[in-house]
């Protein structure tokens, strides 16, 4: 089976983080969510993928190349103008000649794809949508199904009072190639607003499969923070980089840590970092590669990206620090702050 990975979005709700890099490349425990997705696909036997590109697509191509590092063959579909979720897949129609999978490049999941695909085949569906029960309903489209799993109604981001169900669309789909006859060529076309409602109107065989595994849409800063803490809490089964040096503490290669520091798991320290004495790396902190952390620094519940220099006696709590930032000595930054260095691309 082949897969299409949607990676063309601009990531407006994640700004300022997405000024510098495309949304599928923002690090989740020091690896892009797109990398976690490729590892998931490879581990479950899906070895050929198309990735569509638009916003800063060259960065994605440089990082992943042809995909050989992950045991996957990658083909890129570049969009000068955004085609929409369904329109982007239509552009790559010639790649698909059998049942295929569509996933988002900026989601985080450990879904068992085989179960979803088996469900699709069992129902002889034209299209299957993967659903997930979540607590917060109004930020996502809600899907209503009958007892057989057949989709009977869509509610796009409804109010709290309008629904009783909380199974939402994950953006993971399984399609038969016949789906392309419903997607117009060379125009913007969306899965949620256009294709799925049309399939329902045409009374096609469209079904919903509810996954019990982990899924998170990294659509805003709150969900981005949540995804990091969920990984560190063990709620999602993904490959965490680095060596596990003690309970719930991972450290990358080449990192030098002074013996007189305090490490509180769960936390992750990337590769080639230098951490001086008197430093506290608190719970739910992720430190990227090539970081320099000077004496007396305290990091608590922070996400720190690559190549960051934090000078002496800095105190950071619940912050996100972007690539190549310099944090000058003896300052304190607290709850929910985002520091990102905007670069020219």
Image (tube, rainbow, N blue to C red):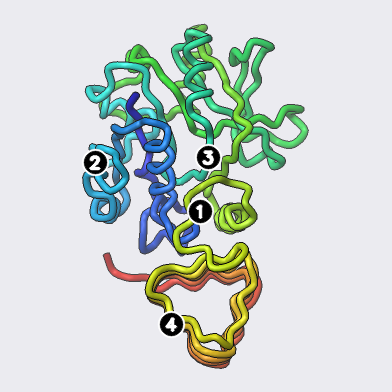
- Residue holding disc 1: 13
- Mark 2, residues whose alpha carbon is within 10 Å: few (<14), some, or many (≥20)? some
Figure quadrant of residue 336:
bottom right
57 to 6, vertically: above or below = below
Q: Which callout, 2 or 3, points to the residue nearer the camera?
A: 3
Return the disc, 4 or 3, that comes first in the chain's sequence. 3
Nearer the N terminus, badge 2 or badge 3? Answer: 2
Tell which circle, 2 or 4, labels the residue nearer the N-terminal end: 2
Q: In the rendered image of this protein, does residue 299 appear above or below residue 5?
A: below
Q: 265 or 332, which is in the foreground?
A: 265
* Residue drawn 70% across the image and 31% down it: 166
Residue under circle 4? 274
Res 207 → quadrant: top right
Q: CA distance from mark 2 to mark 1?
A: 22 Å
How far from the left and from the top, in percent, is residue 32? 41, 54
Left or right, residue 176 beside residue 53: right
Looking at the image, is mark 1 or mark 4 earlier in the sequence? Answer: 1
Q: Are marks 2 and 1 in contact (CB under 8 Å)?
A: no
User: Local crowd at mark 1 within 10 Å, few (<14), some, or many (≥20)?
Assistant: few
Residue highlighted by disc 2: 78
Classify mark 3: helix, strand or loop.
loop
**Cβ atoms at labels 1 and 4 below 8 Å apart:** no
Residue hosting label 3 = 110
* Spatial CA span between label 1 and label 4: 33 Å
Label 2 or label 1, whichever lies nearer to me, is 2
Return the residue nearer the eye: 261 or 219: 261
Side of 114 relative to 154 (left or right): left
Mark 2 vs mark 3, CA separation in Å? 27 Å
Label 2 – label 4 distance at C-alpha: 39 Å
Q: What separation in Å lies between label 3 and label 1 (alpha carbons)?
A: 24 Å
Classify mark 4: residues with Cα within 10 Å, few (<14), some (14-19) or many (20+). some
């Amino acid at each position: 089976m082949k897969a299409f990975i949607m990676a063309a979005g601009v990531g407006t709700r994640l700004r300022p983080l997405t000024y510098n890099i495309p949304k599928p490349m923002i690090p989740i425990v020091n690896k892009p969510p797109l990398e976690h997705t490729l590892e998931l696909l490879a581990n479950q036997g899906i070895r050929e993928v198309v990735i569509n590109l638009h916003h800063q697509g060259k960065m994605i191509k440089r990082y992943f190349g042809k995909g050989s590092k992950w045991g996957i063959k990658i083909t890129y579909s570049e969009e000068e103008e955004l085609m929409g979720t369904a329109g982007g897949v239509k552009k790559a129609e010639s790649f698909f000649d059998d049942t295929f999978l569509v996933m988002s490049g900026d989601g985080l999941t450990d879904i068992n794809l085989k179960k979803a695909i088996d469900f699709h085949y069992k129902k002889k569906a034209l299209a299957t949508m993967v659903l997930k029960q979540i607590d917060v309903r109004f930020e996502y489209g809600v899907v209503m199904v009958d007892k057989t799993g057949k989709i009977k109604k869509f509610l796009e981001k409804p109010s709290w009072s309008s629904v009783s169900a909380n199974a939402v669309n994950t953006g993971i789909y399984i399609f038969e190639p016949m789906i392309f006859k419903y997607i117009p060529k060379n125009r913007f076309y969306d899965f949620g607003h256009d294709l799925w409602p049309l399939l329902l109107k045409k009374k096609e065989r469209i079904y919903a499969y509810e996954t019990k595994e982990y899924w998170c849409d990294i659509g805003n800063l709150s969900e981005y923070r949540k995804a990091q803490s969920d990984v560190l809490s063990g709620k999602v089964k993904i490959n965490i980089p680095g060596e596990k040096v003690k309970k719930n503490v991972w450290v990358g290669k080449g990192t030098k840590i002074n013996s007189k520091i305090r490490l509180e798991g769960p936390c992750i320290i990337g590769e080639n970092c230098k951490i001086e004495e008197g430093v506290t790396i608190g719970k739910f902190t992720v430190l990227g590669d090539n970081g320099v952390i000077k004496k007396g620094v305290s990091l608590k519940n922070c996400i720190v990206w690559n190549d960051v220099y934090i000078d002496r006696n800095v105190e950071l709590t619940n912050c996100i620090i972007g690539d190549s930032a310099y944090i000058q000595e003896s300052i304190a930054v607290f709850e929910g702050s985002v520091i990102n260095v905007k670069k020219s691309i």
